[in-house]
Amino acid sequence: MNGEHKCLAETNPFTPHPARIVRSYHLTKDVKFFQVRFVDMEEALRFDYKPGQFAMLSILGAGEAPFCISSTPSRPGLLEFCIRKMGTVTSALFELKENSFIGLRGPYGNGFPVEEMRDKDILIIEGGMGVAPLRSVLLYSLDNRDQFGRVAVLYGSKRPSEMIFSEEYFALKGRNDLECHLAVDADDTGKWTENIGVVTTLFRHLKKVDPENTFALVCGPPVMYKFVIKELIKLNIPKDQILMTLERRMKCGVGKCGHCAIDYIYTCLDGPVFNYWDVLHMRELI
Ligand SMILES: Cc1cc2nc3c(=O)[nH]c(=O)nc-3n(C[C@H](O)[C@H](O)[C@H](O)COP(=O)(O)OP(=O)(O)OC[C@H]3O[C@@H](n4cnc5c(N)ncnc54)[C@H](O)[C@@H]3O)c2cc1C
Ligand code: FES
């Protein structure tokens, strides 16, 4: 009887696993960084994920919500999340102190095709909260630098104070094995030393792109996609090598509830990473 019980619990995809907030701090006024570890250390080391996948975080009495994993599987043990305060679950998360318990289940979604991207150039274009999923693939490519070609990042945020992980990105500018261009829409500090303008203005700083050999990864606010894709098409990057991570309302994360369905696809299973062909066939995706 006991054995049966254990078996059911282990196979139930809705069971959250206990985890602890190891570290948390504000990245901007309304965005917080969370470093999380499963209570069971073996489970922490076993948890295998791909850059671009997401997890469901839950808090007793508040509920559960999906969040991209912002850390890289090349640094196992700790999981990192970058979370904007929106409503019930995220407000409850913001209140939790370090060492608090939360529930965690996953990883879910398809993630980026890192095997297919091997030996190719990577061009990352991100705006605002788009860093949450793309930081994972960026750190992954830097940790496995010899497995990828050129790596370039174009990152835009509204104002200097809203640039998430700004210290990390400024540190990247000092590396000679990647190109990193930063922009803000407007500088309200008078101290910003990088570019001013929307993220697409950064394309003119990019060194020559070899389109057939490049995967472009895009994530940001909905308005950004149209303009960024225009630039990528101008560069002749093939449509199946333009990858976007897109958010839909999700509840179960495992293809059971239908909340995230568009036509015949479940974005929690078939996404959140889609290529430009997918988007052309399902305009509702963006
Ligand atoms: C695959 C996936 C990955 C995500 N990754 C991240 C991440 O890394 N960091 C992060 O901060 N957020 C992420 N989100 C969004 C996050 O899940 C929502 O902000 C969260 O569910 C809000 O929960 P809440 O209970 O705090 O807000 P609620 O009380 O549920 O809602 C507050 C407000 O936010 C709106 N809202 C809630 N969910 C969404 C949504 N998915 N899209 C648009 N509006 C929404 C509601 O309509 C409402 O107006 C992701 C979502 C998905 C589907
Ligand atoms: S979130 Fe339930 S089916 Fe996708």
Image (cartoon, rainbow, N blue to C red):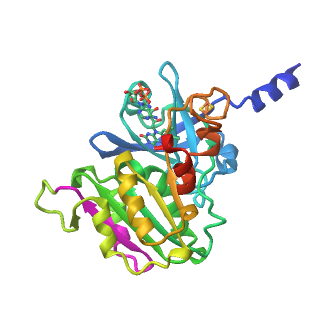
Quarter holding the C terminus is top left
Residue 68 lies within the magenta run: no
Between residue 277 and residue 208, name the one nearer to us.
Answer: 277
| Residue 104, percent from left and from top | 59, 35
Q: Residue at x 22, y 68 (%)?
A: 194
| Residue 103, percent from left and from top | 57, 31
| Residue 63, percent from left and from top | 51, 23
Image quarter where ligand 2 lies: top right
Between residue 202 and residue 130, name the one nearer to us.
Answer: 202
Residue furthest to the left = 190
Quarter holding the N terminus is top right
| Residue 158, percent from left and from top | 25, 51
Q: Residue at x 42, y 59 (%)?
A: 229
Q: Residue at x 45, y 57 (%)?
A: 218
Q: Is residue 124 above or below residue 77?
A: below
Q: Is residue 238 above or below residue 70?
A: below
Q: Range of the magenta residues? A: 170-186
Q: Residue at x 53, y 34 (%)?
A: 57
Between residue 143 and residue 18, name the one nearer to us.
Answer: 143
Residue 183 lies within the magenta run: yes
